[in-house]
Image (cartoon, rainbow, N blue to C red):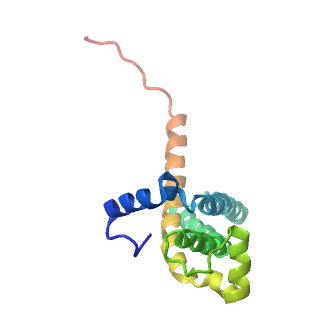
Amino acid sequence: MAGNYANLPSAVTGLSSSRGVMGFYSGWWPGLVGKIPSYALTWTIFQQLKLARDKMSDRPANNIENAVMGCIASGATVCIMIPMDTIKTRLVTQASGKAVEGVLYKGIIDCAIRVAREEGMGTFYRGLPPRLVSVMPMIGIQFGVYEFMKKVMLQRQELPPPVKRRGKQ
């Protein structure tokens, strides 16, 4: 809740005294509604990119290719999911007490309809460039490392167990 509190301790005490324990969960539902499909979509797009890439090449994807496919998957997901992120942000910030009187949204659907009608569809994509710049490299690295570690772990399973040697004890 940027701009409302000077620091974390004042935010914790202020929020707990003004809204109680439930104040810490404002925006939880819209956040969850956005995150779960977002992660599922990113993984689905990544897997589809891997399948398409594998049809074009007879060798396994290298770490850089996996990272690039992760960047593409996350970029596509951000473009699809950013309207939900905008709605979540609107709902969370209205709970902070900074909302203008009469602008309070009743929920996810009310917020989506009103933003589209009153401000236009472009409003949902206003933060797209910085979001892409922050998310794509992070998720690209995540997928590159994930696929690398998956190969390492699979190779470890293929190794024969170490031979126990009898000797001096």
Q: Is residue 26 left or right of residue 169?
A: right
Q: Quadrant of residue 162?
A: top left
Query: Where does the image place residue 37, in percent across and percent down from the top left?
Result: 67, 60
Give above or below for 103 relative to 157: below
Residue 62, percent across and down? 54, 61
Asked whether residue 87 appears in the rendered view, the answer is yes
Residue at point 29% right, 12% down? 167
Residue at the image point whose x is 47% and y is 54% from the top: 20
The residue nearer to you, when weighing 129 against 93, is: 93
Q: Position of residue 94 (x, y in %)?
A: 55, 73
- Vertical position of residue 165 compared to residue 28: above or below: above
x, y percentage for residue 134? 48, 73
Residue, far left: 168
Say whether residue 120 is visible.
no
Number of numbered discs present? 0
**Residue drawn at x 72%, y 73% as measured from the top left:** 110
The one nearer the camera, 8 or 38, is 8
Q: Nearer the viewer, residue 138 or 113?
A: 113
Q: Quadrant of the N terminus?
A: bottom left
Q: Quadrant of residue 106?
A: bottom right
Q: Horizontal placement of 83 versus 62: left or right?
A: right
Q: Quadrant of the C terminus?
A: top left
Left or right of 124: which side holds 133? left
